[in-house]
């Protein structure tokens, strides 16, 4: 697996990482042993960047990652996150976001303990509470770096202005935000700001929460508790319109000889050397398909035609339901 470097402070990671969230929440039935096998297979095949968060299953996902890397800590680059204190204890029954320095310290210790490690390679603020100055949060994170508990700092779904303010306190290594063929809002202001500052980009939901596989055509295919049942882009008319777009992905993939998922990942990788997508899967077969995308070459005319066809304006529906939308770009 090729390596890429995140940020000017130089965190070397596999060009494609592994998103572990679905092993605990969101995308249907789960199997802990199979998930651990998938993570270990990722390490076996040179995928080093493992993405988790304290919020995924109330710590369950971090424990799972900890179990998988036991005895192999040096092979993994562990990225985890804090800041979502509860999913329903906040305003209007939405998430409770806590980015105070005291909570950063408390959450870091709890994550280290669940992961069973003595340091976190990349520690993200998952969501920001705009009432807490980002300078204060970064100050606490910088102290965690000094204490040796954290190696690199990241932010998730913040605005260009917040990125600049944060980076002025301590170098930010990575911005993790949603970015894919069907979610490109980042390109207007945030991506240019990250590039100007030398901050790496870690696109989450890079295969559109499974949509860009082309296989998901109806909510009836999903388990009752699947997150996508409440995702606007998967609902009714939005889904119907978006399915027309995915046909373009399918057709382009067929022309260049890869699968739709591989095309979605190859497109992201072609957007710049500073981009490291973290497709999420529970399964070794999908992991293998996804990592092979690093070897797919996407001819420039196909790349341009594809991104023009799937422009932001053509995609139907918001990318989150309210109130989660209000937590973005803070
Ligand atoms: N910072 C944030 O706020 C934030 C938000 C969301 C996610 N994340 C992180 O980003 C990671 C990736 O995002 P995501 O998991 O939400 O979305 P994603 O990677 O776009 O899609 C995951 C879904 O696609 C399916 N899938 C993956 N590869 C496939 C393949 N080759 N063929 C068929 N289906 C495939 C998975 O199936 P299976 O589950 O059946 O394997 C899962 O249902 C997460 O795991 C998490 O670590 C971060």
Image (cartoon, helix red, strand yellow):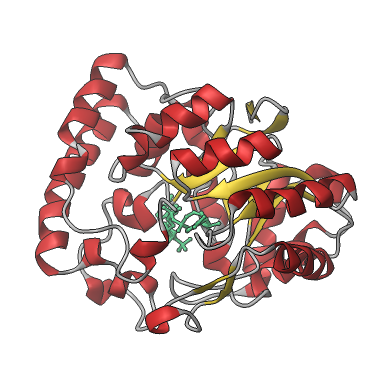
Whether residue 159 sits left or right of residue 300 in the image: it is right
Provide residue 33's location: percent of width, then percent of height: 68, 71
Whether residue 199 sits left or right of residue 190 in the image: it is right
Provide residue 40's location: percent of width, then percent of height: 72, 54
Which residue is nearer to you in this view: 264 or 292? 264
Which residue is nearer to you in this view: 105 or 118? 105
Which residue is nearer to you in this view: 142 or 243? 142
Vertical order, 15 against 196 (above or below): below
Vertical order, 45 against 109 (above or below): above
Image quadrant assignment for residue 60:
bottom right
Residue pictured at 89% horizontal, 56% vertical: 118
Q: Does the image show residue 206?
A: yes
Provide residue 167's location: percent of width, then percent of height: 63, 36
Vertical order, 262 against 178 (above or below): above
Residue pictured at 55% horizontal, 63% vertical: 21
Q: Quadrant of the N terminus?
A: top right
Q: Does the image show residue 150?
A: no
Residue pictured at 18% horizontal, 29% vertical: 308
Image quadrant assignment for residue 320:
bottom left
Query: How many numbered callouts?
Result: 0
């Amino acid at each position: 697996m090729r390596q890429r470097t995140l940020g000017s402070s130089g965190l070397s990671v596999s060009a494609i990482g592994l998103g572990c969230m679905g092993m605990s929440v969101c995308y249907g039935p789960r199997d802990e042993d199979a998930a651990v096998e998938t993570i270990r297979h990722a390490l076996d095949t040179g995928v080093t960047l493992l993405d988790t968060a304290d919020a995924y299953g109330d710590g369950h996902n971090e424990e799972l990652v900890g179990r998988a890397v036991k005895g192999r800590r040096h092979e993994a680059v562990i990225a985890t996150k804090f800041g979502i204190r509860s999913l329903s204890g906040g305003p209007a029954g939405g998430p409770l976001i806590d980015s105070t320095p005291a909570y950063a310290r408390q959450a870091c210790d709890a994550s280290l303990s669940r992961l069973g490690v003595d340091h976190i390679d990349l520690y993200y603020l998952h969501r920001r509470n705009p009432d807490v100055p980002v300078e204060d949060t970064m100050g606490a994170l910088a102290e965690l770096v000094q204490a040796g508990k954290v190696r690199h700092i990241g932010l998730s779904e913040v605005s260009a202005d917040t990125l600049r303010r944060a980076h002025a306190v301590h170098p930010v290594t990575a911005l993790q935000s949603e970015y894919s063929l069907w979610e490109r809002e980042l390109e207007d202001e945030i991506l240019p700001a990250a590039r100007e500052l030398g901050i790496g980009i870690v696109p989450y939901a890079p295969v559109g929460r499974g949509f860009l596989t082309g296989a998901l055509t109806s909510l009836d295919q999903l388990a009752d508790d699947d997150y996508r049942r409440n995702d606007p882009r998967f609902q009714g008319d939005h889904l119907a319109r978006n399915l027309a777009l995915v046909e373009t992905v399918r057709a382009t993939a067929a022309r260049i000889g890869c699968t739709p998922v591989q095309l979605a990942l190859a497109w992201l990788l072609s957007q710049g050397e500073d981009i490291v997508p973290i497709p999420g899967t529970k399964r070794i077969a999908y992991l293998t398909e996804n990592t092979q995308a690093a070897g797919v070459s996407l001819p420039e005319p196909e790349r341009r035609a594809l991104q023009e066809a799937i422009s932001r304006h053509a995609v139907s529906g918001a990318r989150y339901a309210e109130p989660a939308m209000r937590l973005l770009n803070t």
